[in-house]
Image (cartoon, grey):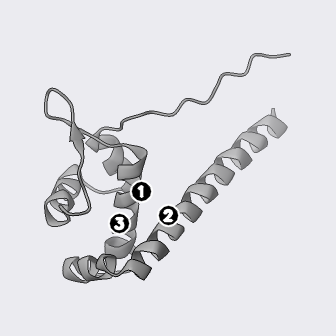
């Protein structure tokens, strides 16, 4: 039986990595952190670099979807997130996105396996 390496998940991501995930500049993430301080609270390491968890990335994914995809203004996004129903809908959408990403990764792995 061949050795299969376990899939590892990072605990923390850098601001550069998160910027690449959303195809935005790190400065935009810092700006969103200031504008949405009630929603976004990123931890920092001993050198002051932001450390993003999966939960932080989920929150940023919701913001990115509202602002960059759906075209909300910053004030519109803030109002939208204040409403409880909208927050639940955004969280459901994020869960669906995560599931689709996982399925995509499994399909890519299966395709590689079949073509080998």
Tell me residue 53's x, y (percent). 37, 43
Mark 3, residue position: 64
Q: Secondary structure at mark 1?
A: helix
Mark 1, residue position: 58
User: Relative to the observer, which residue lies in front, 27 or 6?
Assistant: 6
How many numbered tags mark residues here? 3
Q: Secondary structure at mark 2?
A: helix
Quadrant of the image occupied by residue 66: bottom left
If you read the primary sequence from the N terminus, does the residue marked by circle 3 or circle 1 appear first? 1
Residue 56 located left or right of residue 6? left
Residue 49 located left or right of residue 18? left
Question: What is the spatial separation of the Cα atoms under label 3 and label 2, in whole angstroms?
Answer: 11 Å
Q: Residues within 10 Å of mark 3 (few under 14, many from 20)?
A: some
Quadrant of the image occupied by residue 38: bottom left
Tell me residue 45's x, y (percent). 21, 30
User: Relative to the observer, which residue lies in front, 77 or 26?
Assistant: 77
User: Relative to the observer, which residue lies in front, 106 or 112?
Assistant: 106
Residue pictured at 35% horizontal, 56% vertical: 23
Quadrant of the image occupied by residue 85: bottom left
Residue pictured at 59% horizontal, 54% vertical: 101
Residue pictured at 39% horizontal, 66% vertical: 62
Quarter placement of the C terminus:
top right
């Amino acid at each position: 039986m061949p050795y299969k390496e376990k899939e590892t998940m990072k605990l923390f991501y850098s601001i550069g990595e998160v910027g690449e995930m959303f195809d935005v500049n790190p400065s935009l993430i810092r700006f969103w952190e200031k504008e949405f301080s009630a929603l976004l609270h990123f931890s920092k390491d001993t050198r002051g670099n932001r450390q993003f968890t999966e939960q932080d990335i989920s929150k940023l994914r919701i913001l990115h979807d509202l602002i960059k995809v759906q075209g909300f203004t910053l004030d519109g996004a803030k109002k939208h997130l204040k409403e409880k129903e909208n927050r639940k809908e955004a969280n459901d959408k994020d869960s669906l996105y995560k599931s689709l990403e996982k399925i995509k990764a499994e399909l890519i792995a299966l395709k590689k396996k079949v073509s080998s």
